[in-house]
Amino acid sequence: MAQSSSSFEALLTSLAPQGRTALLPALHAAQETFGYISDQVAAQIGKALGVPLAEVFGVVEFYTLFHRHPVGEVLLHVCNDPACALAGADTVYKQIVFQTAESAAGEGVSTKVRVEKSPCLGLCDHAPAVLVQSLPVKASPAQTWQELVAATATRPLTYVDGDVRLLTALCGRHTTVRLDEYRRHEGYRALEQALQSPPEAVIEEVKASGLVGRGGAAFPTGIKWQSAAQAPGSPKYVVCNADEAEPGAFKDRVLMEDNPHAILEGMLIAAYAIGAAKGYIYIRGEYMLPYRVMQRAVEEAQAAGLLGERILGSDFCFEIEIRRGAGAYICGEETALFESIEGKRGFPRLKPPFPTTHGLFGKPTVINNVETLANVPLILRLGAEEYRRLGTPQSPGPKLFCLSGDVKRPGLYEVPLGVPLRHLIEDLGQGMRNDAPFQAALIGGAAGAFATPEHLDTPLSFEGLRAAGIPLGAGVVTVFDSTRDLRDPLYRLARFFAEESCGKCYPCQIGTQRQLEIMERVLEGRPLPGDWERLQDVGWTMTDASICGLGQTAASAILSAMKHWPELFQPAAERR
Amino acid sequence: MTANLVQFTLDGTPAQAPAGTTILKAAQQLGIAIPTICYHDYCTANALCRICVVEVKGARVLVPACTATVQDGMEIHTQSERVQRARRVILEMLYSTVDLSEAPEIEAMAAAYDVDCQRFPQAEPRRPPLIDDNPMYVRDYAKCILCWRCVQVCAEDAQYTYAINFKGRGYETQISTFYEVPMPESTCVFCGQCIGVCPTGALKFKRQYLLEIGYAIEEILQMTRSERGGRRRRAERSA
């Protein structure tokens, strides 16, 4: 990335032919070069890319990692969401603020260091999580900011285990798998196999596997591919959704950091199947390390002829471009993600039309989650029939679960779909961290719902959880012991949605704010008469009338808590 | 032509309309009024306000009538319990957010949907200060409901001027010029189209505004003249 203003200008010149789609890359370069995006630089970018200045401003304002004013030489982000709160994130934040304010009085460093509260950083197994200059560190409440800066040299390592190790066979070994090693472990063999059969056969195999999307919506992958393959229009695109930002989720981060080529191989097979020549990987802005790892993997693949022209001697050509998000949970919504790649504010589009016919740049597009794509080489290597031996008939295959919160051993666990929740928490996670017993688990992240002790034997499958009224989502399990006041995570989730709502449709734009205000009263034990009905009305209106999945799930956890623990929403004096 | 007609039911009545007709237009033709706020006949419909949502049998969530088109076999309910709840709550939330004193159409809707304008006590409203930075019009975003019409007519829906876009996001969203520069320093050509489509009086011609706050016509003419003079003097100075 650009280091000086002259190299920034050179970069801008090289981006100019791309036009508006290069807007986020240009703004990232400006932010890194100058520490902020001034009106002059924004105007320069707008002129170079042919974007109206007011719209450049609209984009700068939308993404929280872009700053209109200087932010200091050292920028720290402290996670503010439930799993890190359980581990003392508030203390870390206050400690750093106190320390910098105190030293500012003597040494004038206040302009040098800036600490911000951040939504989930995808480091829930290392709670409380901190990013220092976009790099992850494991924080403890006793650290100073100088110690945290020094700690970025080693990345926090995620504990990876499970009943099966297929997706994670090469994960959790504390190194990134390079291309040569990946190939020694049958890497890119599935691609070779795919290139020797017609695209329709590849799609049939994926359909036969029963794979459904692992990003949360659980749409059948093969049907999505088929629909894009059959859609008129060209070019077609494959997009890897690596905008992992669901509070409690870190599986895609681990897959990218540890075994990036499995994701590239999945994308290549998808591209061959639908007839795409260009792909994008959209990685959330907070994931600097995964971005670097994926960038290097793409370069390795290009050098080895696995990306580019005539791949593995076939007629198949495919290029991958990596894009960084810039701090917007909404961009994990597939159409908002397209808007972001196109250089716009991350507003979700109206559906229909769907991405398979009108996706990125209005063209037929397959967009799949990181974990979904990592399943693809596995399916082709094992064969659909063998793959289906894992899991349940309705939920075949392995699934990654991100376990965090009050368990002894938080980490990433790979299990066949259908194992009971109890197995994940008690056997794999080694049970509760403290002496206090299990109270609840938030399943599916902020957009999820609560499991109670009665749900411990519920199978972790799409149909099993659905029967219990809980979404499996992306596979997030955040555990709370009986000492925890659940109003705290509920309030944090309300704040998360109020901060992350894009503001496009009224139910979510206003509803997330009103929900937050009511939850603030609930947290303090002084709800007003009528707040219960207000929460229900706001929650159901968001669920029923919002444009996209963010608004439709913004009340999910709160409505679920109202069902399980209505007493939490009563005034403190009236409880018990 | 019948090949292009689709059959559906609207509030229980069998009906037909040409394929591609929105539910909103199909209902209008049948004499059923569906309320709208952000929708404008000459602007791109974005289904933002969600007041026009209707219940379609089999659909997981409510459907916006302004953009969804009628389909064969569709069973549409424009006044179901779910629809009424969503409309009422959206209106109550709007009242808790913006100043709707100059939005008579929304006031009429509030009466029709049994809206409690004080439903959300202690709610933080959006009350940015009035912006009076040019001789042509004032911007009182405390009245802005973010219908996007002004942004759209300033851009591809009409003028291709691109003077305004958004600041912030979520509840904090506001309409703004590039880095909040005063309107005369933006690309605004003062065509007035944004004022023409504003449904809540957030954008208002300066003379109307000055009349409303009690100035006499003579005073207003005097003021705007001197402001225009001031602008000319500034231009001469910077030349």
Image (cartoon, rainbow, N blue to C red):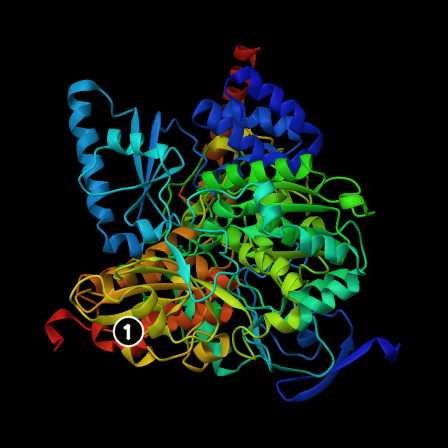
- Residue under the image location 58 percent in, 40 percent down: A297
Residue positioned 36% across, 29% down in the render: A71
List x then y, in percent, for residue A198. Answer: 81, 61
In the displayed orientation, state which residue is furthest to the front. A184
Q: Nearer the viewer, residue A249 or A549?
A: A249
Depth check: give the residue in front, A88 or A155.
Answer: A155
Q: Residues within 10 Å of mark 1 (few under 14, many from 20)?
A: some
Left or right of B137 in this view: A47: right
Q: Say which chain tag 1 marks.
A: A
Query: Amino acid type of disc 1?
Result: Trp
Q: In the rendered image, which quarter is residue A573 located in?
A: bottom left
Q: Nearer the viewer, residue B143 or A329?
A: A329
Q: Position of residue A484 (x, y in %)?
A: 20, 64
Q: Is residue A200 left or right of residue A462?
A: right
Q: Residue at x 64, y 54 (%)?
A: A266
Res. A238 visible in picture: no
Farthest residue, direction right: B1
Secondary structure, mark 1, is: helix
| Quadrant where the image shows the N terminus of chain B | bottom right
In this view, the residue in front, A91 or A495, is A91
Mark 1, residue position:
A532
**Residue A130, horizontal then vertical, whole percent:** 32, 42
Can you tell which quarter of the image residue A483 is in? bottom left
